Amino acid sequence: MDYEELKSIGVMRTMPKEEAVYIEGEKNYSIYLILSGTVGLYTNVMKQQASVKKATLQQGDFFGEMSLVDPNRNFDTAIAETEITILVVNRIHFNRLLLSRPEITMGIVKTLNSRIKSLADETTTFRTIAATGLAESNKLTDEDKTITQSAINQKIRDNLQGSDRATSVKDTSQPGSATANLRALLKQIDVELEPLASAESDLPNLKKYAITAPAKYYSCLMEKRMKCPICGFEFKDHIPKSNKLVITNVMKDFRKKYEDFDMTWFSIVACPSCNYADETDSFASVETSERKTIYVKRYRGNEIIFKGHDEVRSIDDVILTHYLAIETENLVNPDGLKLARLWHSLCWLYNDVGDMSLAKKTAANALHYYREIFLQNASKFSLREEQANHLMMGELSLLMGNLKAAFLHYNYVITLGSDGNYKFLQQAETSIAALQEAN
């Protein structure tokens, strides 16, 4: 390949060590040629789990060629492992070069075939690992097997005797019964949820906590150039490097705890120019048809209340950007699951700073969306997913002080028995025992 010919249609860029060239899931319209340094290709970087290193590329190698197949999203994340100089070639210019130089085309096709096969192999591997992990989590030890279904049923009857519940949960084996069961369960919860709070109404009155991110968090971050898809403003932000993240625990409400890091501090990106905000992995992914609507509703004429993070990130700005993300999500085709995640993340933040009043308020909003999602999609859930949803709703109810609702959600997990996930069953039993001991 004639590098001089490529240089005539590309742009040279120098990037420091550990900066991301592009992020998995983002759109990409370019191919990159390494002129000096090394680049690592990773998958799962933005999915809050261990990343997988696919390759280390050196001088003379190119990457980003999958944009020729699908420019709408990157299939991996490219990170500079040393200071690098790269040549960035727009896919349109590159395509013109391919048309005029057949020998280059054949080389690219071979590389694409190899990368696509590799991608297919990775997908198969991940599915196998996931299936194996699920099977292992559902295996019962000899001690576990002594808990028969009749013993579980007896435990349910014993628990019900100490509650105000007058009727039993319907048979979950009936088609579509998950939705009916949840509706029946919700009718038995005496305490109604407060009216859904508005993120926009909270923005002018946010409390200040004067807490900053610990220095140790920054060893798990990389600086990334961002471009706002709404107003076009370019800025820099810090995003997590999943190859540096080590999960140490998963809490009862499924919050992941990391060694020397807290994901909730860095899960949102907000534009300091127009205050458009979204979760890090979807910040750049805005439908063209939605951009104008968001621009008009969010940007034009609105006061800019977030002007960028300080050198050391504050909890106040983290909370503010969460509210901005919720406000943005409500502007066009709101995604209930994303809203549930955002309110739940805010709940964690308020809980961390000890503001239990706002922790309960945001928990109520998260619970509202989780319930709506479950009511709409319960028939599509596996038993394991059904158990997980009820455990989540039980934990949120408990935080809000609604002990009866928490008990009913935990109890429902037990009615599903060990056919779902035995660890979830144990968690529900432990939570019910704790409630009974506390009362």
Image: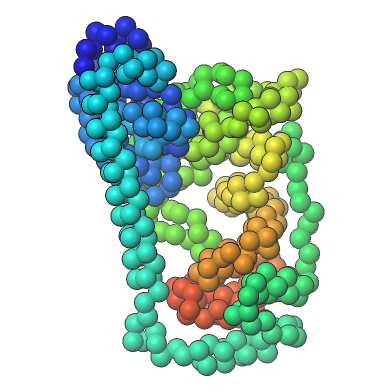
Q: Which quadrant of the structure image shows residue 10?
A: top left
Q: Residue at x 50, y 89 (%)?
A: 149
Lateral position of residue 267 relative to residue 364, left or right: left
> How many marks can you see?
0
- Image height check: is 157 above or below 172? below
Quarter that holds the N terminus: top left
Q: Position of residue 174 (x, y in %)?
A: 63, 79
Q: Nearer the viewer, residue 187 or 383?
A: 383
Displayed quadrant of residue 278: top right
Is residue 194 something that shows in the picture? yes
Judge from the rendering whether residue 193 lies leftward or rightward of residue 172; answer left or right. Answer: right
Looking at the image, residue 329 sits to the left or right of residue 265; the answer is right
Indicate the colouring scheme. Answer: rainbow
Q: Position of residue 25 (x, y in %)?
A: 45, 37
Give the residue at x 64% y 46%.
335
Does residue 179 appear left or right of residue 67 in this picture? right
The residue positioned 32% from the left and 22% from the top of the image is 32
Residue 309, position as x, y percentages in the image: 53, 27
